[in-house]
């Protein structure tokens, strides 16, 4: 079977070639600090359509447009509020996506037909090198979802992208290897279409950091550290009702679907692991006899960084059930618990 090119050395020349391939309408999987993305020219309807095919993703789920600089957000968004500009200045390049009112550049095939657009400047030298080379060729932005099949665990290594998507890519497409992702869970998505910021998907940029940048308290479900612990798993709706803007239209955030981020293994949270099961917990927790320890991170940052590769390891080893002890506390632990709750589907 024909496979995409796997580029292990992302030199300036290699990134130039990759940018040209993007411009020609091909798909380029690339590393970011969060997870790997599957990129296409955000202005090319056919290229973007191929992302949806390769991922088997429903076409009404919007894509994030990746940009090489803060300034370029003005190309894609209109009526940008001051607080969004503060966030962009403080946290880009970085693990944050801003949802803004779209400009005419942001076509329906990128926004899923919504009047908003998600934009982000990722903090990874390979991503930034690719985005800049693409911009210098006249490109405006790169639409990129996480480089996994729809509903599955996001890839945090180039090898995981290759295992997951090679069968759905062409020889003209490329997978750029930039090593393991430093953050390991997807960007914080912040809705900036209302009077103040609202977190749609928690990540490494926290409510506290948003408050320090903007002086505004974050509204909504992830507004404070304990909010997610108080939330009953079943009360979380499949999409977020945005009554502030959008005239009561629903914002579709596919990463907020229940039953998302799922490996083949069945995930149980906070149970005692038994013989034959996989186990992921902070290193303070010992591994019972006969249990397969998949990850023993020393802190929550390492927990986030290792989580998706540990879940993939379970599948590779053919482990049917994995017990995960959720990390407590704030910061990225909130994002970890959010993903675990979805991956475990209430178990
Ligand atoms: O860290 C990340 O954000 C990674 C890397 C590759 O940048 N990308 C990523 O993309 O996680 P994806 O497509 O797997 O998840 C992006 C989420 C989706 O749930 C999508 O619905 C939401 O962002 N999104 C994109 N544009 C949006 C918009 N205009 N309004 C609301 N949600 C939006
Ligand atoms: Mg995704």
Image (cartoon, rainbow, N blue to C red):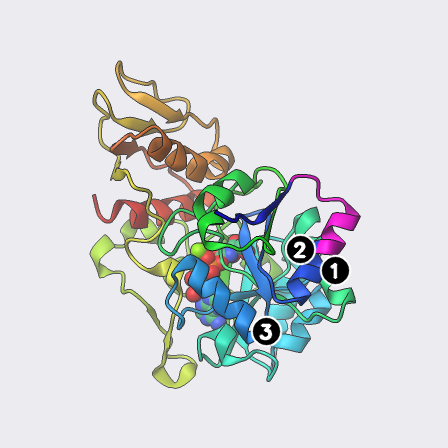
Q: How many marks?
A: 3
Between disc 1 and disc 3, the foreground one is: 3
Residue pictured at 56% horizontal, 41% vertical: 181
| N-terminal label among 1 and 3 | 3
Front-most of residues 220 and 157? 157
Residue 3 position within the rendered picture, expressed as x and y whole percent measured from the top left: 53, 47
| N-terminal label among 1 and 2 | 2
Mark 1 lies within 8 Å of ligand 1 (Cβ measured): no
Locate residue 173: give its quadrant.
bottom right
How far apart in space, not on screen, are marks 1 and 3 (Cα)?
18 Å
Which element type, helix, strand or loop, lies under badge 1? helix
User: Pointer 2 and pointer 3: residues touching (CB < 8 Å)?
Assistant: no
Between disc 1 and disc 2, the foreground one is: 1
Residue pictured at 43% horizontal, 42% vertical: 333
The residue wearing badge 2 is 93
Label 2: few (<14), some (14–19) or many (≥20) C-alpha neighbours in 10 Å: some
Which element type, helix, strand or loop, lies under badge 2? loop
Q: Is residue 101 left or right of residue 202?
A: right
Whether 101 is among the magenta residues is no
The residue wearing badge 1 is 132
Residue 17 position within the rendered picture, expressed as x and y whole percent measured from the top left: 73, 55
User: Which label sits on residue 309?
Assistant: none
User: Which label sits on residue 44?
Assistant: 3
Q: Is residue 131 left or right of residue 276?
A: right
Q: Quadrant of the C terminus?
A: top left
Label 3: few (<14), some (14–19) or many (≥20) C-alpha neighbours in 10 Å: many
Whether residue 198 appears in this view of the structure is: no
């Amino acid at each position: 079977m024909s496979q995409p090119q796997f580029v292990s050395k992302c030199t300036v020349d290699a990134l130039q070639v990759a940018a040209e391939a993007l411009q020609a309408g091909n798909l380029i999987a690339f590393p970011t600090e969060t997870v790997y993305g599957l990129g296409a020219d955000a202005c090319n309807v056919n290229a973007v359509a191929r992302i949806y095919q390769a991922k088997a993703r429903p076409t009404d789920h919007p894509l994030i447009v990746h940009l090489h600089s803060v300034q370029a957000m003005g190309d894609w968004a209109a009526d940008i509020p001051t607080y969004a500009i503060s966030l962009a200045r403080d946290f880009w390049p970085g693990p944050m996506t801003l949802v803004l009112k779209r400009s005419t550049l942001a076509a329906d095939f990128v926004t899923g037909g919504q009047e908003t657009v998600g934009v982000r400047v990722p903090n990874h030298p390979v991503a930034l090198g690719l985005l800049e080379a693409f911009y210098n060729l006249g490109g405006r932005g790169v639409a990129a979802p996480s480089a996994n099949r729809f509903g599955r665990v996001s890839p945090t290594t180039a090898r995981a992208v290759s295992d997951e998507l090679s069968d759905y890519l062409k020889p003209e497409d490329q997978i750029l290897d930039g090593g393991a992702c430093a953050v390991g869970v997807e960007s914080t998505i912040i809705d900036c279409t209302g009077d103040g910021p609202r977190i749609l998907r928690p990540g490494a940029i926290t409510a506290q950091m948003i408050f320090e940048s903007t002086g505004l308290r974050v509204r909504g479900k992830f507004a404070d550290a304990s909010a997610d612990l108080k939330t009953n798993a079943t009360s979380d709706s499949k999409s977020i009702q945005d009554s502030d803007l959008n005239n009561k239209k629903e914002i579709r955030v596919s990463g907020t679907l229940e039953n998302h981020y799922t490996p083949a293994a069945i995930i149980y949270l906070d149970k005692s692991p038994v013989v034959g099961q996989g186990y992921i917990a902070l290193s303070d927790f010992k591994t019972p006899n006969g249990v397969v320890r998949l990850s023993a991170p020393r802190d929550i940052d390492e927990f986030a960084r290792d989580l998706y590769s540990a879940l993939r390891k379970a599948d590779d080893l053919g482990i049917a059930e994995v017990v995960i002890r959720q990390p407590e506390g704030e910061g990225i632990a909130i994002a970890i618990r959010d993903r675990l709750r979805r991956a475990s589907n209430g178990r």
